[in-house]
Image (cartoon, rainbow, N blue to C red):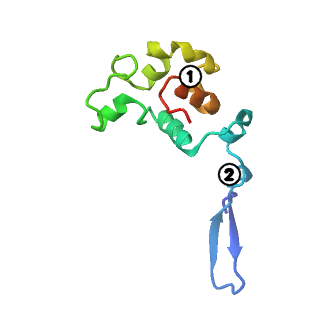
Amino acid sequence: MHENWYFEQYDDATFSTMTPSIPPRASRNTPTPHSRQRGGSVAKRERAILAQLRCKGKSPILQKYLHDIGASPCDACLQCGQSPDDLHHALYDCPEVDFFWSLIPGDPMESLWESPVEMIEFLRASQRLPIA
């Protein structure tokens, strides 16, 4: 049998089932990397936005995505007016966010994965997210 599965027999031995074994760090009681990082925590809504941004920038905080799904009349950035307001523009090209670069250690794209607390601070400071 596969090493990640274990065989479970019940008392009456009339049936059995294959159940996947869950790695210890995947337990629901184990804190996520987001909540362990620097003692900070990331709210569920903010974790969802980070996940959306990691998935090719398909997030409602970007005007290009809203325009693509028909929820916005244009895809121009609400802060600088340049088009399109996609993930690359929001993290690298928007002139309105240059001041906030000091909040992100290293490359912003890597920070989506490695520094979620700092990325949320950056998104709030650059007015992409409402201040909690």
Q: Which residue is mark 2?
A: 26
SS of the residue at dot 1?
A: helix
Disc on the earlier residue, 1 or 2: 2
Q: Is residue 10 above or below residue 57?
A: below
SS of the residue at dot 2?
A: helix
Q: Badge 1: how crowded within 10 Å, few (<14), some, or many (20+)?
A: many
Q: Badge 2: how crowded within 10 Å, few (<14), some, or many (20+)?
A: few
Residue 50 position, x and y percent, is 53, 36
119 relative to 28 in the view: left or right: left
| Kind of residue indicated by mark 1 | Pro
Residue pictured at 69% horizontal, 87% vertical: 12
Residue pictured at 67% horizontal, 55% vertical: 28
Q: Quadrant of the N terminus?
A: bottom right
Residue pictured at 55% horizontal, 13% vertical: 99
Residue 114 position, x and y percent, is 64, 30
Q: Is residue 85 above or below residue 50?
A: above
Residue 62 position, x and y percent, is 40, 30
Q: Which residue is mark 1?
A: 108
Q: Quadrant of the C terminus?
A: top right
| Kind of residue indicated by mark 2 | Ala
